[in-house]
Image: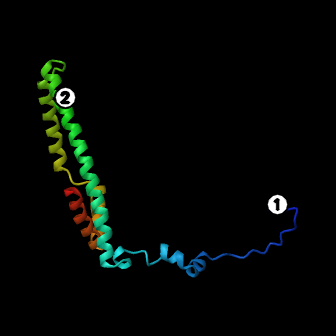
Amino acid sequence: MAATSQGSFDGKLEALDLAELTKKQPWWRKLFGQESGPSAEKYSVATQLLIGGVTGWCTGFIFQKVGKLAATAVGGGFFLLQLANHTGYIKVDWQRVEKDMKKAKEQLKIRKNNQIPTEVKSKAEEVVSFVKKNVLVTGGFFGGFLLGMAS
């Protein structure tokens, strides 16, 4: 080490044990310790249902609005394409469309015979595990989602 102008270094350093330090700090244990398990251990039944229901309703409501907008855009685009085709601005090569559709069907049949990728399986297992650990929140979310879609 380089010497400083304020004094000399005597070489005595004390090691800091982070494990002991974290045991003494309760906020650290609450954030990262054993208390950070599934929500079933942290909140009451009513709180879990309320959290799930509110987030589900918000998600369902937004999903409904975005879905309507997307359906309007796709339908309007399809209508404009049909209008342009009918008036002669666009000429569709239906034989090429049919050939491409046959090719796509064959590719789908090939993919259908293959097994599910491991990434999809692992994500599905994660979702199942989350649902099992947080049944009340998930149920509240599903109910809220349906209410949000209906409103």
Which mark sits nearer the N-terminus, 1 or 2? 1
Q: Residue furthest top?
A: 88
Q: Which residue type does callout 2 highlight?
A: Leu
Query: How many other residues sit within 10 Å of disc 1, few (<14), some (14-19) or many (≥20)?
Result: few
| Residue 89 drawn at (x, y percent) | 19, 18
Q: Position of residue 146 (x, y in %)?
A: 20, 61
Mark carried by residue 99: none
Q: Residue at x 21, y 54 (%)?
A: 115
**At x 25% / y 43%, what residue is drawn?**
69
Q: How many marks?
A: 2
- Label 1, label 2: how far apart the Cα atoms are: 76 Å
Classify mark 2: helix, strand or loop.
helix
Q: Quadrant of the C terminus?
A: bottom left
Quadrant in which residue 59 is drawn = bottom left
The percent position of residue 17, horizontal first and vertical second, equals 63, 77
- Quarter of the image where one finds residue 75: top left
Q: Label 2 belongs to which residue?
A: 80
Location of the N terminus by quadrant is bottom right
47 vs 2, left or right, is: left
Residue bearing the label numbered 1:
2
- What amino acid is labelled 1 in the image? Ala
- The label nearer to you, 1 versus 2, is 2
Nearest to the observer: residue 2 or residue 52? 52
Residue 8 visible in rendering: yes
Is residue 92 in sight in this rendering?
no
